[in-house]
Image (spheres, helix red, strand yellow):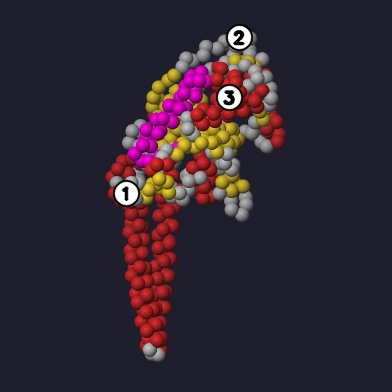
Amino acid sequence: MLDIRNIRNDFGDMITRLNIRGLDSKNILEKIIELDDRRKQAQTKIDALLAETNQLNKRIADLYKNKKQDPAKELQEESLLIKKEVQELQDKYKSYNDKILEMLSNIPNTPHISVPLGNNENNNKIIKEVGDIPQLLDDALPHWDLIKKYNLVDFELGNKITGAGFPVYIDRGARLQRALISYFLDKNISAGYVEYLPPHLVNESSGFGTGQLPKFEDDLFKVPSENNLFLIPTAEVPITNLYRNVILKESDFPVKCTAYTPCFRREAGSYGKDVRGLNRLHQFDKVEIVQIDSPQNSYKTLESMVDHIAMILDELNLPYRIIQLCGGDLSFTSALTYDFEVYSAAQKKWLEVSSVSNFESYQANRLKLRYKNDKGENKLCHTLNGSALALPRIFAAIVENNQNQSGSINIPKCLHSYLDFKIIQ
């Protein structure tokens, strides 16, 4: 959520940066400042009236002490009128406050000035490509045929027990999935990340803190309950919320967290896209990395997270490319995002497997996540996260890209110590 102080102090810069998203934000930012002015005026009047009430109460107490009840009663009536006026002003203040919060909650983050202009993925910028595209035989199979051939994943069983988009991993498929999870976590831990195993349900405060609520409620699976719980769309939500309402010290930076969780997404509005096989699911496994850092260092941290994910893909020997998202393709909360895509040789297409983002202070402002600087001032932290990695498309690329002439599938060497088989045949 944007900070009103920044909107006031950097008004022109805010408009320029939101224009990168294709948003004409001048009117709404001006309206927020106007409401904030009214809120401040109401608070000033409230403070003055409360001070006047305190003085009246002292005079009333003195009059009663001196047994002058009639003058005291007149002052009490005056005090009651002031209290009524205070209540009316407090109601106005709350109304202004609620409206400001509603408006701010629906404005996306301001993109970093380096984010390319553009409305969709066609305007994204390819930073680099790594690895050679595998040359498969003409009769090579896509992953949805391979997993059926070797009984690795069963979509019909998932549909039977839950519904479409909820696959069941079987035997070697389940073990390969578990090996990938363990491998990703071990790589993250060796890079200094602390592992967590968080709840898979979050409350509304957590959803608001990382930006999923209120705007994207339709994308979440909601669990009716006393407190309205939601299945997590990513481990980013519970992990980042570990630090909600926390004040860190500069010596705590960087905070580095990792977690494996299943992720649940309704994927509202995704109809018509290529959803075959493992490409798009309602439930999938993902290993997440989250960092919290100072504003001065967060973009160096972002680059280090990009390098870390690239190293994992290098070890998996998967061809990949890194893409900087344009303004129109950025997520609601991100200031700058790099996507990783691996090449699926059998499908002859690039598949997104990770997004690495710097949210700057956008989430921290919602979370009230701050740090105390060397002057003793409380400042907003910067939050970052990345998928390291999302499993379904990694799984698909591994089985497709490593097909042999005989039809068997080689397992990447980095996973051999996690499995008791090196080939699927």
Contact (CB < 8 A) between labels 1 and 3? no
User: Which callout, 1 or 3, points to the residue nearer the camera?
Assistant: 1
Question: Disc 2 to disc 1, how far (Cα)?
Answer: 66 Å
Q: Which residue is mark 3?
A: 395
Q: Earlier in the sequence, mark 2 or mark 1?
A: 1
Instruction: Please state which amino acid type lies under the numbered disc 2.
Output: Gln
Residue 11 falls left or right of residue 290: left
Q: Alpha-carbon neighbours of circle 3 within 10 Å: few (<14), some, or many (≥20)?
A: some
- The question of residue 319 being in magenta is answered with yes
Using the image, determine if residue 401 lies above or below residue 246. above
Front-most of 98 and 338? Answer: 338
**Residue drawn where x is 52% and y is 11% of the image:** 135
- Give SS at disc 3: helix
For marks 3 and 2, the one nearer the N-term is: 3
- What residue appears at the point 37 percent right and 86 percent down from the top-left corner? 63
Tell me, for residue 342, which label it has, or none: none
The residue that disc 1 covers is 375
Q: Which residues are magenta?
A: 291-320
- At a point 56% along the width and 34% down the height, the residue shown is 260
* Rendering coords of residue 17 (x, y %): 33, 40
Q: Quadrant of residue 346?
A: top right
Mark 3–mark 2 CB contact (< 8 Å): no
Identify the secondary structure beneath mark 2: loop
Q: Nearer the viewer, residue 404 or 118?
A: 404
The image shows residue 49, relative to residue 226, as above or below, that is below
Q: Is residue 180 visible?
A: yes
Q: Is residue 93 magenta?
A: no
Q: Name the residue beneath numbered marker 2.
A: 405
Which residue lies most toward the front here? 251
Say whether disc 1 or disc 3 marks the residue closer to the N-terminus. 1
- Above or below residue 56? Residue 410 is above
